[in-house]
Amino acid sequence: MGKRPASNILIRLDPRARVALQQQIYSGIRLGILNGILEPGMRLPSSRALAEDLGVSRTTTMLALEQLLAEGYLATQPGSGTFVARELPDDLRHVGPSGPTPEPKHPPLSARGAALAAVPPPARRLGAPPRAFRIGTPGLELFPLRLWSQLARRRLRSIAPAQLDYGDPNGLRALREAIAGQVRTRGTRCAAEQVLIVGGSQRGLELICHLLLDPGDQAWIEEPGFPGARRALLAAGARVVPVRVDADGLDVEAGARNAGGARLAYCTPSHQFPLGVPMSLARRLTLLKWASAARAWVIEDDYDGEFRYGTHPIPCLHGLDVDGRVIYVGSFSKTLFPTLRLGFLIVPPDLQPAVRRVAEAQPPALDQAVLADFIAGGHFDRHVRRMRAAYRDRLAALAGAAERYCPGELRLRPVQTGLHVVADLDGADAETVFQEAAARGVEVTPLSSYFANGASAANALVLGFAAVGPEAVRLGMERLAAAIAAARRR
């Protein structure tokens, strides 16, 4: 189905666009109002008539109209219908009909800036609150917020004026010591001096890529892979080399054939993003052997490896490294909550002086202190154990709901670790399912979003199962089944 205009209010829909149909309808009506095409007081078609005219579901048009009503662009009159509001929202009162777009007076984006802007986000989100099947968000309603608040109040009462000054660029000593002890559960050891606290793992990736790469250096990235890593490498001026992932993880031999002289390799060995496969021990050893021979660095991103289901962890790459070539990137966004914005790097001793010099102002000292107390008091370990059990239940609910509502249409791949699963689709296009699911308030991400060329050999979705409880997971799967049915009709 190509682009088509609506006869009444000139909305143009493009089902191939990455923007959901609901958002396209919302934007089309809003733009018509701002441009004066839809005049104040003008009556709009009903949601049913608009849906028939556009060839979409009535749910899609209803959601778009409800958003416009909530924002003040439309108004309803009982028994009469829906009308363009006679007064625009306060922040748009002075916006008049638009003429031709003026030529920008500033230079365009740089080639690097344009490449960065083209990198897709890690997930396609519909906005708050958490919903099925959001990727990357833990079960926030289960976080011990009262305990966290108590620890924060205790720290605030004992704060001294000297602690308001700039701190150690490596981060709070107490937190670095707590992390050095904590990572032993991941199969590695390090001294507190090797730990650098950063404002989230993404900031850590960007810092280390700028430190280790010159413009034009080749760098491996998993294919499919994490968009944030691609963004960090591009920002450092690297030539990104996608290396395919198979059932054993990153295909080191393929990477060596295509770019054997690469200076750096980025990987997610504990739970490959997004395919979810762990890198086999043999493949890990092969990667380390290649890095040693090529004098290359390896970045190990362990973003959600704490959560395992019925399997024993393979020692992390950092724990197997004898040459000091692996830089470990850790985060608390998945284990605790994303807005904490605290991550860490474990760097080899010879890199510590350089990292210390280039490290910027540290994240808020209070957050670091509270997290240090949270770990040292044993609360972190208890929370992870509790969440592991909760996520196991939510994963079971996802599998059961998929079998009940989508038999033969949605096949979940095996899950051993992490907070998301890949599901293969039969009989419906993943991109179309994404659009139909978004119109029903459900978040799914096509697997093709994580490939460098925008294409995937598999027609599949990536589904998170951590953000909401089992009942919401089941309801989300029922709506996803309706979205798949609608996509098949299209």
Image (tube, helix red, strand yellow):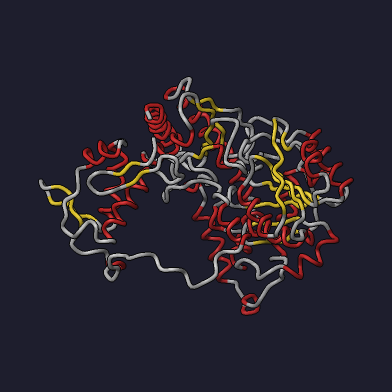
Residue 85 location, x and y as percent? 20, 59
Q: Is residue 431 above or below residue 170?
A: above
Say which residue appears at 42% left-offset and 24% top-offset: 405
The residue lying at 53 percent from left, 65 percent from top is 153
Instruction: Name the image quarter holding the N terminus.
Output: top left
State the image coordinates of residue 12 (x, y, percent, origin top left): 34, 46
Looking at the image, residue 271 lies above or below residue 399: below
Q: Is residue 455 above or below residue 400?
A: below
* Residue at 22 percent of width and 56 percent of height: 38
* Residue farthest along the bottom direction in this orientation: 161
Residue that extends furthest to the top in the rendered view of this protein: 408
Instruction: In the displayed orientation, state which residue is furthest to the left.
Output: 79
Q: Is residue 257 visible?
A: yes
On screen, residue 382 versus residue 210, left or right, reads: left
The answer to whether residue 190 is left or right of residue 427 is right
Q: In terms of image quadrants, where is residue 371? A: bottom right
Q: Please name the residue shown 76% across and 51% down the image.
A: 218
Image quadrant in which the C terminus is located: top left
Q: Nearer the viewer, residue 266 or 398?
A: 266
Where in the figure is residue 116, as x and y percent of width and height?
60, 56
Q: Residue 373, can we see it?
A: no
Count of picture labels? 0
Q: Position of residue 149 (x, y in %)?
A: 51, 60
Left or right: 432 in relation to 462? left
